[in-house]
Amino acid sequence: MMDYDLTLTKTLKRGVDQFGHKEIATKLDDGSYHRYTYADAYERICQLAHALDEYGLERGDRVSVMAANHYRHYELYYGPSCSGRSIHMTNHRLPDEHLIKIINEAEDRLLFVDPAFVDTIESIEADLETVEKYVVLDETVPETSLEPVTDYESFIEGYSTEYNWPDLDEETECGICYTSGTTGLPKGAAYSHRGLFLLSMSYGGKDSFGICERDVILPVVPMFHVNGWCLPYSGTLHGSSFVLPNSHTDLEDVEELIRDEGVTIAAAVPTIWTEMATYIDETPAADISTLDRILTGGSSPPPAVMRRFDEEFDAPIIQGYGMTEASPHLVNTLETTEMRELPEEEQYDLRTKPGQPTPGVELRLRDENGEPVPHNGESKGEIQVRSPWVIDEYYDRPDATEESFTDDASESEAAGESDDASSKRWFKTGDIGTIDEYGYLDVVDRVDDIIKSGGEWISSVELENELMAHDAVVEATVVSVDHERWQERPVAYVVTNGDVIETELREHLLERFPKWWLPDLFAFTGDIPRTSTGKYDKQSLRSSFVDEYGSLPLEDGDDQ
């Protein structure tokens, strides 16, 4: 066979050569649109690559990008990676101390930032050790203390619109994204060209997402979040058109973008689609009839919402399961012929599960002793995976790597059918799941008590530690509670010495965490129940909360 490296350069070139006329539309802050074609974008990507050369970035250097979904961000998905560098997709929602840690650890030399996030960077600039220059993603530079700084258009202006792309090894790093600090500080997942090329190809499979040239893709999911679910790469490879929402991600904006731009695929967390169903009821002019399918992940949408989008809007919701370490995709909704023979209610029960592994992914369940778990829909085990787009280590975190990866062989390898040691590595997701007789995975719990709120992670451990740092707090634990809108929200149980009120604790937490991390409820108690091993009994607390309150948000008049 030919020696043919699978790189994002080939993804880009295919999009331009085959579909150079296809459009990328961005809704700008003022409500107008920026429109250009793949061919137009390619010329600016070439200019960007030249600008990185002229600045002096070496092969393997990283650039940080903190931006919303727009055409300049799209260019940054390709310019650095195709020229042998790497893009660090940086989540502006992280606490300051996490941003400082990951930018320094990744050794980002340039930092590209939207005007809306300049204040965020200004507040941590003094602690950034490796950033040499800031580039504001606009035509001008706003008033700022960042130094040295320039605007993006000036940065790329005047360079050639053609570029001699280097021949890259497919295992070259093309990007890095950090976990959201669910169990402490974020951990870096570095992606290879090969992994993202193969994942992009898999998205075109009919039993995956079926992305194709006819599609118009609206990625509401942030592009700083795990490769934007790999849509900027897979859509380009398959020649789809793009509609990029920028900051316009409210329900009204999303509906308008779908209606006006003829969107066929929209990707967002379940909260958006749950609220969209209500918005359509309340807005007679709303029209999402061009939608062919919806991609969602992070948690399962309510069955009633899935049924409505399927039957009333003819836009089935395809949910996926994955994570930062998996680039992010592992499992998705799949209606098998066997499933379709089941009664309708049983079909929808199966569709509420994440689904089956996508081609290219191996998945298994292991109990606490490392033994296989039966696929009976009831027996639980830790979900372990491997795939060409799953990382095999955390960046510069040997201890975390040792804890989260295993080198044991599969049954076939144990039988001597494979000599490839690298193929024996499995990633331990930390999630607990079941697999039923039809092969459908269901995620039923988490090894670590993390909280997923609106598709973003909140670390209960870090909240607990910070609460305990307050002089008046004797004990504290934080649990996840179901929320009608955000899927999950934190609730804090606190034992104090009597000299503190809720407002003080909120102000204390705000000194370190963003507002959306703060617990929705502080329950002051004289005692926190513990398990037989002395740990806080979070399951008992969740059950007590349900018995007393039901779910969040609390109704007016509930005693807090």
Image (spheres, helix red, strand yellow):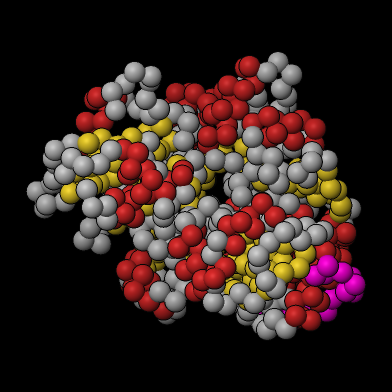
Q: Quadrant of the N terminus?
A: bottom right
**Residue 393: percent from the left, percent from the top?**
44, 72
Q: Is residue 269 left or right of residue 480?
A: right
Q: Which residues are magenta?
A: 154-169
**In the rendered image, the vertical position of residue 344 relative to residue 384, given as above or below:** above
**In the rendered image, the vertical position of residue 197 relative to residue 469, given as above or below:** below
Q: Viewer-proximal residue, 24 or 16?
A: 24
Which of the 4 quarters of the picture holds residue 258? top right
Q: Looking at the image, which residue sits at the far left?
A: 532
Residue ID at (28%, 23%): 559
Residue ID at (64%, 77%): 132
Q: Total of numbered circles in the picture?
A: 0
**In the rendered image, the vertical position of residue 372 relative to residue 208, given as above or below:** below
Answer whether residue 245 is visible to the viewer in this image.
yes
Answer whether residue 292 is visible to the viewer in this image.
no
Secondary structure that dominates the magenta span? loop
Residue ID at (21%, 31%): 544
**Residue 325: percent from the left, percent from the top?**
48, 62
Residue ID at (22%, 48%): 472
Magenta stretch: residue 518 in it?
A: no
Q: Viewer-proximal residue, 352 or 296?
A: 296
**Residue 331: percent from the left, percent from the top?**
49, 49
Which of the 4 quarters of the picture holds residue 44? bottom right
Q: Is residue 185 left or right of residue 38?
A: left
Q: Is residue 173 left or right of residue 215?
A: left
